[in-house]
Image (cartoon, grey):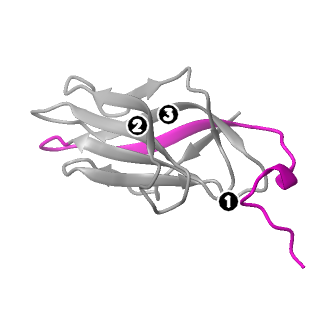
C-alpha cells in the first residue's frame, strides 16, 4: 500500500475554494484509491474546511468528473492532526487523476493532501489510454 502526498513540501492554504492538489496516475498500471487524508499544518479557524475528493477521467479537465468522498476538517483539530476518509474503492487508470477540491474555505488553515493507494494489477493493453512506444 502506498501513501502519496499530493502537493509540494510546503503546506497548501485552504482559505480559498478550488482545486488545491492533484494526483495524476502517470504509471503503467491502474491503481485503486483506498483512502484520502488532510494533514493539518495550520489549524482551520471560524469555518470548517470541506474538501471534495474527485476523480477525473482526463487529467486537467472537469469533464466527466465525479465525487469520490468528502473530507470535513473541523476547527477543533490541531496542528499535526490527520483527518481522513477510508473504505474508498475507486480505480484510477493511467492518464486519469484525483483532485482535492476545497468547496468550503476557512479563515485560516493550511496542510497537506494524501492519497492511500494500492496497485490494481492489469495489463496496459486493457487500457485505452496506454500505447506502446514504436
| Residue at 13%, 32% in the rendered image | 47
Q: Marks 1/3: CA distance?
A: 19 Å
Residue 16 in the image: above or below residue 90: below
Q: Marks 3/2: CA distance?
A: 10 Å
Quadrant of the rendered structure where residue 51 is?
top left
Spot occupied by residue 23 in the image (x, y as percentages of width and height)? 54, 52
| Residue at 45%, 61% in the rendered image | 61
Q: Is residue 38 within the magenta segment?
A: no
| Circles 1, 3 touching at the beta carbon (< 8 Å) | no
Residue at numbered disc 2:
39
Q: Mark 1 or mark 2: which comes first in sequence?
A: 1
Question: Who is closer to the viewer here, 10 or 22?
Answer: 22
Residue at numbered disc 3:
36
Residue at numbered disc 1:
26
User: Label 1 neighbourhood size at 10 Å, few (<14), some (14-19), many (20+)?
Assistant: few
Q: Which residues lie in the magenta part?
A: 105-134
User: Label 3 neighbourhood size at 10 Å, few (<14), some (14-19), many (20+)?
Assistant: many
Spot occupied by residue 119 in the image (x, y as percentages of width and height)? 76, 39
Is residue 55 shown to the viewer in this render? yes
Spot occupied by residue 25 in the image (x, y as percentages of width and height)? 64, 54
Residue 22 in the image: above or below residue 82: below
Q: Is residue 129 within the magenta segment?
A: yes
Amino acid at each position: 500500500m502506498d501513501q502519496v502526498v499530493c502537493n509540494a513540501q510546503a503546506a497548501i492554504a485552504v482559505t480559498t475554494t478550488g482545486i488545491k492538489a492533484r494526483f495524476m496516475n502517470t504509471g503503467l498500471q491502474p491503481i485503486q484509491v483506498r483512502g484520502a487524508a488532510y494533514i493539518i499544518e495550520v489549524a482551520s479557524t471560524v469555518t470548517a474546511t470541506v474538501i471534495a475528493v474527485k476523480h477525473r477521467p482526463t487529467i486537467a479537465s472537469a469533464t466527466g468528473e465525479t465525487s469520490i468522498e468528502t473530507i470535513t476538517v473541523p476547527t477543533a483539530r490541531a496542528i499535526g492532526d490527520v483527518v481522513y476518509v477510508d473504505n474508498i474503492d475507486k480505480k484510477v487508470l493511467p492518464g486519469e487523476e484525483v483532485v482535492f477540491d476545497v468547496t468550503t474555505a476557512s479563515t485560516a488553515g493550511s496542510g497537506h493532501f494524501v492519497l492511500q493507494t494500492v496497485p490494481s494489477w492489469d495489463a496496459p493493453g486493457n487500457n485505452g489510454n496506454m500505447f506502446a512506444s514504436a
